Image (spheres, helix red, strand yellow):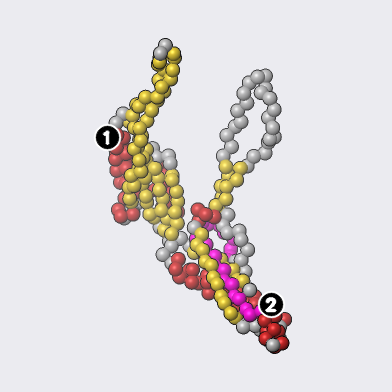
């Protein structure tokens, strides 16, 4: 078996930004009114960016009861009990734009209306079918080129008896790496003068890494911008030379 693996990068044609709108109130109607007002204001700002109205979609997520703890008594014993005191509602706004500049501008406008939760960035391309075929063809050529070198040790190359392929699309969110940047002692020991020690918050580091697997043909240049990666592996199976020796012996 001789294997060829190729990575092809495809530049995204569009991005989907999803932001979360949340509200809290004494009633579900009050929550809904707050979100409707916020949605209308954000939608108006986005439309001013010449974004088509069909590229803005509202997605209702949930409405949940909210509780708080209250002190009370039960059979002369002091207790704390949860009581219903309102509702919390969430809706998501989906926006499709053509590039990251528009995406960041849209997020900035949403921030001005009190939005503080960006759910996700999604990337898409309409050329994925063609790019997958391109990757498979390149993987076949990579496997054949490798076989030409490896099978040159035989007087006559063995015949092909089978071929397999595996092609997978990796979207940018799958190609980010997150790690903790911590440099400190692992053991804090006992409380200092019987006081609890609370460590400072350390955010995790996240960056776009791109594909890390080894390919026979690696695209250039280095991965700098989020792109869609298509990785195709083709395996060409050849008849074993040992089988030929057995046939001759027979």
Q: Which residue is mark 2?
A: 150
Q: Quadrant of residue 184?
A: top right
Please state the extent of the stretch shown in magenta in the rendering.
219-240
In the rendered image, residue 176 lying in the magenta stretch gets the answer: no
Image quadrant of residue 63? top left
Report the disc number at residue 165: none
CA separation in Å, label 1 and label 2: 72 Å
Q: Is residue 206 left or right of residue 246?
A: left
Q: Residue 29: which numbered mark, if any?
A: 1
Residue 102 or residue 185, whichever sits in front: 185
Say which residue appears at 69% left-offset and 27% top-offset.
Answer: 189
Residue 208 falls left or right of residue 17: right
Q: Earlier in the sequence, mark 1 or mark 2?
A: 1
- Judging depth in this view, the residue of 25 and 240 nearest the camera is 240
Residue in the foreground of this view, choosing between 81 and 62: 81
Asked if residue 103 is positioned above or below residue 139 in the image, the reply reads above
Q: Residue furthest top?
A: 76
Q: Position of residue 33 (x, y in %)?
A: 28, 36
Q: Is residue 230 magenta?
A: yes
Q: Is residue 161 above or below residue 91?
A: below
* Residue 42 location (% of width, % of height): 33, 44
Query: Which class describes the residues within 10 Å of circle 1: few (<14), some (14-19), or many (20+)?
Result: few
Q: Secondary structure under badge 2? A: helix
Can residue 217 be seen here? The reply is: no
Q: Residue at x 45, y 66 (%)?
A: 128
């Amino acid at each position: 078996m001789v294997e060829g693996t190729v990575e092809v990068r495809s530049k995204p044609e569009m991005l989907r930004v999803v932001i979360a709108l949340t509200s809290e109130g004494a009633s579900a109607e009050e929550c809904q009114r707050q979100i409707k007002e916020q949605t209308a204001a954000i939608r108006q700002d986005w439309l001013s960016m010449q974004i088509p109205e069909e590229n803005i979609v509202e997605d209702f997520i949930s409405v949940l009861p909210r509780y708080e703890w209250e002190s009370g008594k039960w059979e002369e014993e002091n207790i704390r009990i949860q009581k219903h005191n309102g509702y919390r509602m969430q809706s998501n706004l989906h926006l499709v734009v053509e590039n990251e500049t528009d995406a960041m501008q849209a997020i900035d406008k949403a921030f001005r209306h009190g939005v503080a939760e960006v759910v996700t960035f999604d990337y898409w391309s309409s050329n994925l079918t063609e790019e997958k075929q391109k990757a498979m063809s390149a993987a076949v050529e990579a496997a054949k080129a490798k076989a030409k070198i490896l099978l040159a040790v035989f007087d006559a190359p063995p015949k092909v008896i089978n071929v397999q392929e595996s092609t997978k699309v990796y979207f940018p969110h799958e190609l980010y790496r997150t790690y903790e940047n911590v440099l400190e002692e692992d053991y804090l020991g006992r409380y200092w003068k019987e006081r609890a020690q609370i460590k400072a918050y350390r955010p995790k580091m996240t960056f776009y890494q791109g594909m890390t697997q080894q390919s026979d043909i690696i695209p250039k240049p280095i991965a700098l911008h989020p792109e869609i990666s298509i990785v195709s592996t083709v395996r060409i199976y050849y008849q074993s030379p040992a089988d030929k020796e057995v046939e001759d012996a027979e």
